[in-house]
Image (tube, grey):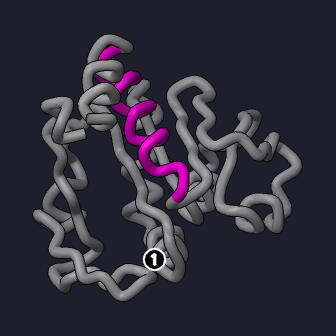
Amino acid sequence: MTRAGIEVVTAGLDTAPVKASRGVTLLPDTTIDAVLEEDFDMIVLPGGLPGADHLDADPRIHQILQRLHGQGKYTAAICAAPKVLAGAGLLNGRRATSYPGVLDNMDLPQVDVRLERVISDGRVITSRGPGTAMDFALELIEKLLGNSTREQVEQGLSR
């Protein structure tokens, strides 16, 4: 996304570094409280467990997802994080994908769970997991800046 010139702000649930599911430590730019009322074009939720469970259990995450969705902004999630979109009610009546066993093991009769790598349904975008991360990122770029920017970034990645 940075390659496309998109300003990216990472926010943690609190001030502590985030330890990802594979042991990688990430330092968010800010906290969710600091950006809760900010106007963003898109919110993207990272996957992994138990991180997606922590996001889903936090009412502030549901609040910002519902607010941005209500404003017609993009909401996106990869890997296990589409469960958070489902928890916030954003997948109802939509097609979606997730890491195998996440959405399909939930009782979501109102969600059309599919196996595609990336699914855009309206302004909700979901992706399967680490192996689809580049496709997911390119889809996000296309939604925000158009197909020509996506193609420029994609070409630069193959060199």
The magenta segment is: 131-146
Q: Name the residue: 30% across, 82% down.
A: 24
Q: Is residue 90 visible?
A: yes
- Relative to 2, does residue 120 appear above or below in the rendering? above
- For the N terminus, the image quarter is top left
From the top left corner, tell me how far across and down residue 137 is, in percent.
Answer: 39, 41
Quarter in which the C terminus is drawn: top left
Q: Magenta region, mostly helix, strand or loop?
A: helix
Q: In the drawing, does residue 97 fall left or right of residue 142?
A: right
In front of the other: 121 or 149:
149
- Picture quadrant of residue 116: top right
Q: Residue at label 1?
A: 51
Q: Position of residue 51 (x, y in %)?
A: 45, 76
Residue closer to the observer: 153 or 70:
153
Q: Is residue 88 visible?
A: no
Q: Residue at x 25, y 70 (%)?
A: 12
Label 1 crowd (10 A; few <14 / some 14-19 / many >=20): some
Q: Is residue 19 magenta?
A: no
Q: Residue at x 37, y 80 (%)?
A: 20
Q: Secondary structure at mark 1?
A: helix
Left or right, residue 75 beside residue 119: left
Relative horizontal placement of residue 124, taking residue 91 as reference (left or right): left
Is 139 colored magenta in this rendering?
A: yes
Q: Is residue 14 above or below residue 44?
A: below
Residue at x-position 28% and y-position 31%: 41
Above or below 153: residue 51: below
